Amino acid sequence: MGKKKGYFEQTADIFRGLSQGMGVTLAHLFRRKITEEYPEYRRPLPARSRARIVLTRDPEGEERCVACFLCSAVCPVSCISMEGEEREDGRRWARWFRINFARCIYCGFCEEACPTLAIQLTPDYEFCDRDILNLVAEKEDLLVDHGGKDNEYNFYRYAGVSMVGDKGSHIDEGTPVNVKSNLP
Amino acid sequence: MALFLGILFLVVKIGIVLGALLFVAGYLVLGERKLIGWIQIRLGPNRAGPWGLLQPLADIVKLLAKEDLVPEGADRWIFLYAPAVVAATALLIFAVVPFGDHWTVIGKRIPMVITDLNVGLLYVLALSSLGVYGVALGGWASNSKFSLLGAIRGVAQMISYELSLGLSLVPIVMLAHSFSLVDIVGAQARYPFILVQPVAFLIFFISAVAESKRIPFDLPEAENELVAGYHTEYSGMRFGLFFLGEYVTMLVLGSLVAVFFLGGWRGPLFPPIFWFTAKVFFIAFVMIWMRATLPRLRYDQLMHLGWKVLIPAALLNIVATGGVVLLIKGG
């Protein structure tokens, strides 16, 4: 501790300290404000921002969603529900697909879990509504005409019921083994 | 006939002053929010009308539409009347504040003050003492621990700083030879009293900020500690009345500082009402600026400042002023 200051010196210290502080705030009064005013200026978001969910299509124009329930299972708040059905050519699809955007936390787990890259999150965040029931999106609200983040991926070229050829015709698949040829 | 005319002018003056005061207090809330915003390099409210000018209207509508809650176990009538005490005592002080010199209308000379009490200064101090009741009753009647603590701190703070408030005004009375606010403004014809009483000005200003419970003295309503202190349990328009009372008190204290130290409505060139409002707004600006800058005083620091610093300083100031006055008057 230094020498104890006299009253006059303490008072001078008080005045100096107060005026320095008040001077800083006064200087701030005349600076340009850093507020970005929302509807007039919309800040550009990163491309991977997670907001509204869409269901995408593959390059052939078919829906990618195969109603495998993986997104529904991984969703932390259980906001996804669907019902699956099989077409005549063996391809699965979702008869109805519902996302409750009022419960959705936009975490992106469903996008990570989806094997066909069907469900994806886009940076579109301006869809609020005064009636909470208007936030439940059905499949026709979610389905889009493009491939989202990967326009060239078709799940059925890599796995699943073969839509492009016989067994063994997937990309990166080994040739099928005839098990009966191994019998003694 | 003269009586009727006199009463008519009085009622008109009261109406104008009350209306102007409530209007200005409402917009002072907006002004404070904008000013604090600018000091924090952000914009204040600017959506409710151009530059946010309809914001007070939006606030009033919001407060009126809220549920009017009276806590269970609360003392119902005292709970309902406490905000009225706060607002009423603050508004009543304006009955003696002079806004200008004289107005001559249809041959009659109308003084620009609602009433020129010859003990105006005592009246002002008495009303600020009564304002303590509003805080105490509001906190006690809420039947809640936070409110009670806030009320206790508020009452202790207010009665402590009332002493230095009054003592710092004694030299002013010595210089003006009168308790009447009109005479005090009249005595500052050559120079404002701040030039000869800087210490008294500082003491009065600090005590005034403490009386209106503004930062750095806002422990009774400290948001980080007591939820909202003595007005925690108030909702809707009752809270609005407390809130308005605080801003009216700010304006009141601004006008008292202007009257006692800055020369009231006096000033060159422009009309008196302009100078008066300019001084009041300047004091309000300084109070808002302090709110944006300073941290809160702890309770014991607050008491220390009031009792051990301001009161001795005010007493010494009285002695010194008395001595100088005697010296000059050659007694």
Image (cartoon, coloured by chain):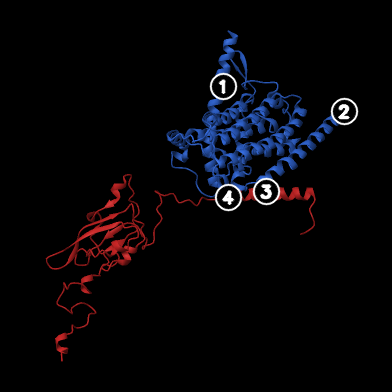
Asked if the residue at tag 4 contacts the one at tag 3, i.e. Cβ–Cβ closer than 8 Å, the answer is no
Residue closest to the far top: B1
**Mark in front: 3 vs 4:** 3
Q: Is residue B138 visible?
A: yes
Q: Vertical placement of A161 versus A30: above or below?
A: below
The C terminus of chain B - image quarter: top right
Dot 3 falls on a residue whose secondary structure is helix
Read off the residue under disc 1: B14
Colour representing chain A: red
Q: CA distance from mark 2 to mark 1?
A: 44 Å
Closer to the eye: label 4 or 1: 1
Q: Can you give x and y, in whole percent of width and height, for residue B177 in the image?
A: 76, 25
- Image coordinates of residue B274 in percent, x first then y, are 60, 30
User: Where does label 2 land, which residue?
Assistant: B330
Q: Which residue is mark 3?
A: A18
Q: Chain of mark 3?
A: A
Mark nearer the N terminus (2 vs 1): 1
Residue A28: mark: 4
Q: In which quarter of the view is residue A141 placed?
A: bottom left
Indicate the amino acid at tag 3: Leu
